[in-house]
Amino acid sequence: MSRPPRRTAQGVRGPRRLPGARFLPARLGPKAAEDEDERPPRAAHGGGLTLRAMLPNAVTAAALCSGLTGIRFAIEGQWTFAVGLVVLAGVLDGIDGRVARLLNAQSRFGAELDSLADSLSFGVAPALILFLWSLTDLANLGWLAALAFAICCALRLARFNARIDVDDQPHKSAGFLTGVPAPVGAGLAFLPFYLWHQTGIAWLRDPVLMTAWLTLIAGLMISNLPTLSWASLRPRRAIRLPLIGFTGLAFAALLLEPWWTLAAICTGYLALMPYGLVKYAGIKRRRRQEAAAAAASPDAA
């Protein structure tokens, strides 16, 4: 004897469910598509990536191609083009995130692609370029220094990704970064090259010096030192107009004397690191005092 069809409370046959359908998630990952938002999903024929969602990822891919092409020029001994393409990759890396926020096209896919591209453009590419430029005369130790730089860059990016969803980040909440960012680390690693290119001083290309310098920058990238974040800087009203003028002059200097300007930027960044340490120590001390005052107040009881 066959059973009657199952009916709902209203007497209407409910929708048929596929076996195992209850185990399937609504979507895979944070976003199934780059242009997905919180609106109800559209029909399958209306899906696909929009140009708005693809543009930031295209900029990231261009940065990756720029950094990797620098390796090719380094193999051919064209050092100016090799280092210049890594610098161009840094410029593109600074653009893609801002383009994504401007177009409201942020996604987990874009964040992962950006980290992978940064690891290659600012970790692998600078390590290989500097190895071919200077460290081949110190083959084993120089190669270890190049590997250390590439690995530390990847570790720095992995730590950043692991802390994206962590609320307790003392450095970030105070407007600081933890360690030297990967693009900045690549720029600092090339500082001896900038000076050598303009002066021709032979000892700037010394493999022992470059091994020590590359190891130092690698350590700064994975360190827990609080470093200044440009996004958190708030210049006083009295210096805003002069600062805008100075930025314009710096851009002009970058066009006219790029290597001297890049060397000056790197030197200025290194000079500001102690200031960042002192500033963060003051913020940390003030926070402890505020916490102690809050704990000692009558309302806390």
Image (spheres, rainbow, N blue to C red):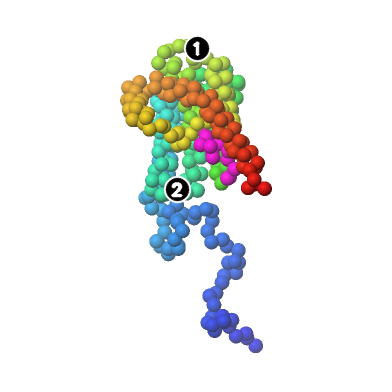
Is 298 placed above or below 32 here?
A: above
Q: What residue is drawn where x is 65% and y is 88%?
A: 1
Q: Which mark is residue 203?
A: 1
In the image, taking residue 125 as reference, residue 296 lies left or right, namely: right
Of the pair 10 and 118, the residue shown nearer to us: 10
Mark 1 or mark 2, earlier in chain: 2
- Is residue 288 toward the left or the right of residue 41 in the image? right
Q: Toward the viewer: 295 or 98?
A: 295
Instruction: Return the x and y of residue 301 as percentages of the image width and height.
Output: 67, 48
Say what secondary structure mark 2 lies in. loop
Which image quarter: residue 48?
bottom left
Q: Residue furthest front?
A: 298
Q: Residue at x 50, y 12 (%)?
A: 203
> Is there any visible trace of residue 221 in the rendered image?
no
Image location (x, y in percent) of residue 31: 49, 54
**What count of labels does the image hold?**
2
Residue 19 percent across, percent down from the top left? 60, 69
Residue 53 lies left or right of residue 185; in this view the side is left
Residue named by callout 2:
106
Residue 132 appears at what percent x and percent y?
50, 22
Is 180 one of the magenta-colored residues?
Answer: yes
Q: Which residues are magenta?
A: 166-181
Badge 2 density bin: few <14, some 14–19, many ≥20, Cα 10 Å: some
Q: Is residue 53 above or below residue 80?
A: below
Amino acid type at mark 2: Gln
Q: Nearer the viewer, mark 1 or mark 2?
A: 2
